[in-house]
Amino acid sequence: MLQVFLATNPFIYRMNLEILSVSQLTQQIKTGLETLFPQVKIKGEISNFKRHSSGHSYLTLKDEGAQIAAVIWKTTGSRLAVTLKDGMNVVAEGRLEVYPPSGRYQLICTSVTEVGQGALQQAFAELLQKLAKAGYFSVERKRPIPEIPETIGLITSPTGAVIEDMSNVLERRFPAARVLLYPVSVQGANAAEAVASGIAYFNSTKKLNHRPQVIIIARGGGSLEDLQAFNGELVANAIYLSVLPIISAIGHETDLTIADMVADLRAGTPSIAAELAVPDTQELLRHIDNLQSRRDSILLGKLEGADRQVYSICSSYAFNRPLLQMQQFDDRLNSLVDQMGRTVKGGYGEKMQRYASVCQQLALLDYRNTLERGYVLVKQDGKFVTGATKLHPTDDVELLFHDGVLPAVISRKKLH
């Protein structure tokens, strides 16, 4: 079959060969190749990945049969949602470019995604449409976040910077809050089930000290595949059915998951979620001070009004006579008080004299005074002995002198 080629195609076989310089040939190849492949998608494995100090990245895409050099300029690299490394299978989109000084062609990448992300994006879009129709994202159903929660339920990984960053924010803003951690894996096969179980636990627990007023779901940034647990229907349903309000803080500010959209409040980062969950203690104290000032002003105004009213009443004619009578009663009361004082003082002095007399009489009867005159008391088994006939030879006794106690034994001599 006869094949006809356009005369503008630089790759047409020329019957009359002309002599070209290396630069001319390279320029023709450059024009033809870049025109023929203005936009391509290539799937391959990354190798020889290097990030230059300028911010540009250089790498090789390869498969089992070939390889091609690729470049990611700094501006493109800053927009990538995936962290590139050797051995990663990716789909790179861009254009072919011939670099004449080295006589080689390379792929100028405009986007790079990890293999499988296309399917994840499609599943994300389909679930997003389904949940939107079911009203999962409706503003009317979102619950308010309590202004001053006593207890916060935190669903996140027990390791990593997320929990440390949130703890620092909570400690700084509102240290009175009590945080209950439900540790979960935030990525992987069982992550979605673990997160849904955490939401269900806080909603259904019978332990009063384990029931928070608000739940925070948090994790750090990552690729679309890393965040897949929060883009599934299982976690979306758990958030939708939760009685407790939920704050979602998944990834960085640029990341947006289905969990974020279903949640009652979305925070750009876990640290922001901690700030949104609790009030600032200093602001609360300032608010309390303002309320106290307003209260004092209102109370002072009422007191001044009442004072003026009382003054008006006291200055009236109807109030004068009762005041005079009250003054007379007050004078009589003062007189009675003085009289009572004198009576009590006199009675007290008399009682003190009688008390001193009784004390003097008791002192005369004190047996210790008798002992000082040379007498001794005898005790046996803790009881005083009142007669010699009650003692027997070898009995142990105690002799009580005025200045101490001595032990003694009754001798065998004949008792008189």
Image (tube, grey):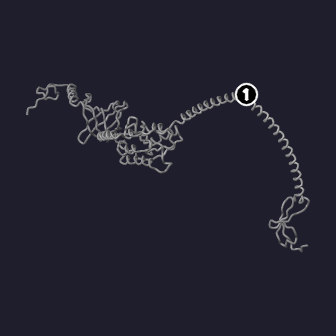
Q: In this view of the protein, can residue 205 be seen by the observer? A: yes
Say left or right for 238 vs 307: left
Q: In this view of the protein, can residue 114 be seen by the observer? A: no
Residue 115: give x, y in percent of width and height: 29, 41
Q: Residues within 10 Å of mark 1 (few under 14, many from 20)?
A: few
Judge by depth and name the residue closer to the eye, 193 or 62. 193
* Vertical order, 208 against 13 (above or below): below
The residue tagged with tag 1: helix, strand or loop?
A: helix
Q: Quadrant of the C terminus?
A: bottom right
Q: Quarter of the image holding residue 129?
A: top left
Residue 168: give x, y in percent of width and height: 50, 39
Q: Residue at x 55, y 33 (%)?
A: 287
Residue most toward the front?
318
Residue most toward the left?
1
* Vertical order, 32 against 173 (above or below): above
Judge by depth and name the residue closer to the eye, 231 or 27. 231
Residue 286: give x, y in percent of width and height: 56, 33
Mark 1 highlights which residue? Answer: 317
Marks counted in the figure total 1
Q: Residue at x 80, y 65 (%)?
A: 382
Say left or right for 141 vs 66: right
Judge by depth and name the residue closer to the eye, 201 or 325. 325
Q: Quarter of the image holding residue 325?
A: top right
- What's under tag 1, amino acid-wise? Tyr
Say left or right for 226 vs 299: left
Q: Quarter of the image holding residue 85?
A: top left
Residue 221: give x, y in percent of width and height: 39, 39
Q: Quadrant of the N terminus?
A: top left
